[in-house]
Amino acid sequence: DGTYRKAEKAINLLTSFSLSHTTIHTITQKIGQTIQNWTETAPLQDVTPQKEKKKPTVLFIEGDGLMLTKGKQEKRPEIHRVQFHEGVEYKGKQKRPVLINSMMFESTVSSKEAFERASRWLESIYDIRDTIVISNSDGGSGYEKDKFDQIIGKCQQHEHFRDVYHVNEKIKQRLCFDKPMEKKMRQAVRAYDWERIETVIATTESRIKNNDDKAAEYKESLVKLKAYLHRNWESIKPIRKRGLPVSKGIGICESNHRPFSYRMKRQGRGFSSKGAGNVAAIISARKNGTFLKALTDK
């Protein structure tokens, strides 16, 4: 949760022995590598009969990448993340949302490796032949619908979503020159009404002044936005309009970046790709409840 130097200070202050921050770093890296190795091999050793595997009605799977702010190499490390869960339940007086049986997997090598790790655990835990699988991503390279199809295999139904946050960011980016129409476009997309979208596009274009130095740039942005929405139209369809037995549960991968970003992006902290992978593996194992098992399994 904290930097190696802060851990050094805490140990030296509160215990009868001392450790340098470099020693703590070495220990952390060894543990992270051990956890990564265990995560790769543990599901392959599973012998649970197919009939005893979990058969949820709905299973959510999401993927997203987290780019670190700086690194010790020329190319900034990226944490590729895949996460699945069985839904959301609300606990306590505050009705705090908690994911049901959530598990997260990561890789700083590639999104393909993160998907492969998730796939092994998915297969060892679940029988999803009669399950509705709901996937969600921003559609970026490595997180397209077909990448989810590859790890899901046979299921009752697969519904893929384009992440709402990223759709709104795309609208904001393309219509930054006309804020009132940006708002109307978000409303049209939320309503899932293509005619309204075309009307907003036409109206926005008519509001562009031809003598504006950036008129051509603005019109090009409109063309790109319309193409983006048309290309992703099927995935943009809201969950409430798909006749699914759930109304919530997507969009969690982005919000679950925080344990990683808090530890690895604040205060200009730098990581190599390998070092980031080991720290991320520890964070994931703690969240998954597999940390001690990964260190004690033989």
Image (cartoon, rainbow, N blue to C red):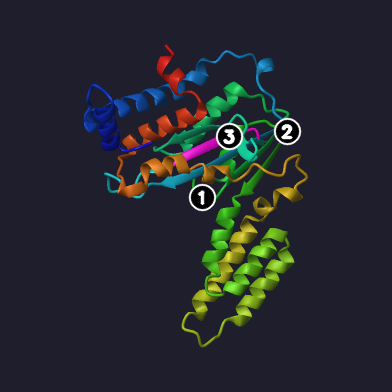
Identity, as a three-letter code, of the amino acid under mark 3: Phe
Q: Secondary structure at mark 3?
A: strand
User: Would you name the residue on which mark 2 appears?
Assistant: 156
Q: Which residue lies most toward the bottom here?
A: 211
- Identity of the residue drawn at 73% across and 29% down: 130
Front residue of 232 and 126: 126
Question: Which label number is shown at residue 84?
Answer: 3
Local SS, label 2? loop
- Give the alpha-carbon distance from disc 1 to disc 2, as whole Å: 26 Å
Q: Which residue is mark 1?
A: 140
Where does residue 273 sit, x and y in percent of width and height? 33, 39
Q: Which residues are magenta?
A: 79-87
Q: Amino acid at mark 1?
A: Gly
Residue 61 image position (x, y, % from top left): 60, 37
Q: Quadrant of the C terminus?
A: top left
Contact between labelled residues 2 and 1, with CB atoms less than 8 Å apart: no
* Element class at badge 1: loop
